[in-house]
Image (tube, rainbow, N blue to C red):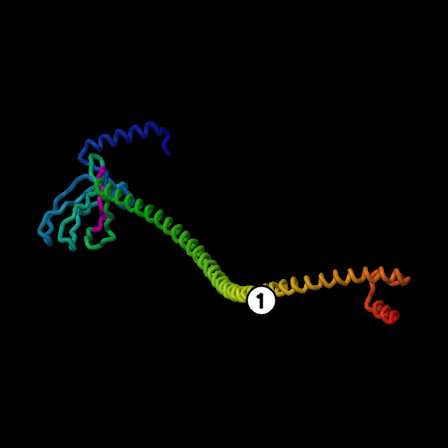
Amino acid sequence: MILNPIKFILQAVDTLKKLQQSPYHIFIRAKGMEVVGILTKIEHRYDPGWGIMRSWAKGIKLNGDTFEEPLDRKNKRTGELEDLIQMRNDLVIITARNSPDPDDDNDDNFQYLMNPYQVNEIKDSLDRVKEKDRIIHDLQKRLKEAIEKANRYQAEAESATSELNTLRERVRNLSERLAEQTQRAEDYKRQLKELQIGMIREESKLDEQLKTSEKLGRLEGKDSADIIIDATKKQIEARRELDKLGLGGLTAYATKEDLERLKDEII
């Protein structure tokens, strides 16, 4: 338990300053940022397999034990010697090797970090991917809305087409009925025309008959009037004679029977 935190922190800061000014470094693994210990020395050793000099880290662990491991890797796939130091400054060195095991063929024994430039490029690439994903999502949303709208329009179009077909059927029926009514009207018109022609002919005949009747009537009417006038005069004279004879009981206008009876009496 730390009795005086401030004093402890000040001592730690002072130690870090001294470590920063020394040739030593805090040795850290990239995987989990695990602190291995203090790197005290970097040695160069000859590798007879590749015929090259390799860098080795040597130091003291936090528990006081010593450690040593290569600071590079023989990459058989590329045929190159890779530097495993991912970051280095006056205070720390970060290695990509996950354990002191010098086996370079086990890929699980390595965890790499990107340098700041690569990280920025990757971050920019990831941002672009996210931006494209967002654009794609928006386009998919718009496409979905457009499809739904198209489906609505299609349904409305189908409904309108059905109504149009119904209207067309009604128009066709009305056209047929109109054609029938038109034909019937033409028949009525023809019959009416024939009737009018017949009436005109009958009127012509009647006019001829009336003209003939008027002529006959005028002739017959004139003769009858003369006869009536003559008969009336004779009746008046006969009445006067009857009055003289004391036979005034006859009717004002003698009938044929009266005249016959008068004739018998005179005879």
Q: What residue span does the magenta drawing correspond to?
A: 92-101
Q: Amino acid at mark 1?
A: Lys
Residue identifier under label 1: 205
Asked if residue 33 lies left or right of residue 190, the reply is: left
Residue 217 on image: x %, y %: 66, 63
As drawn, which residue projects farthest toward the right?
246
As drawn, which residue projects farthest toward the left?
51
Let me know if residue 173 appears in the view. Answer: no
Please report the residue visible at 30 percent of the width from the left and 28 percent of the height from the top: 10
Residue 98 lies within the magenta run:
yes
Asked if residue 36 lies left or right of residue 201, the reply is: left
Q: Of residues 9 and 87, which is closer to you in this image?
A: 87
Magenta span dominant secondary structure: loop
Secondary structure under tag 1 reads helix
Q: Is residue 8 above or below residue 73?
A: above
Which picture quadrant has residue 208? bottom right
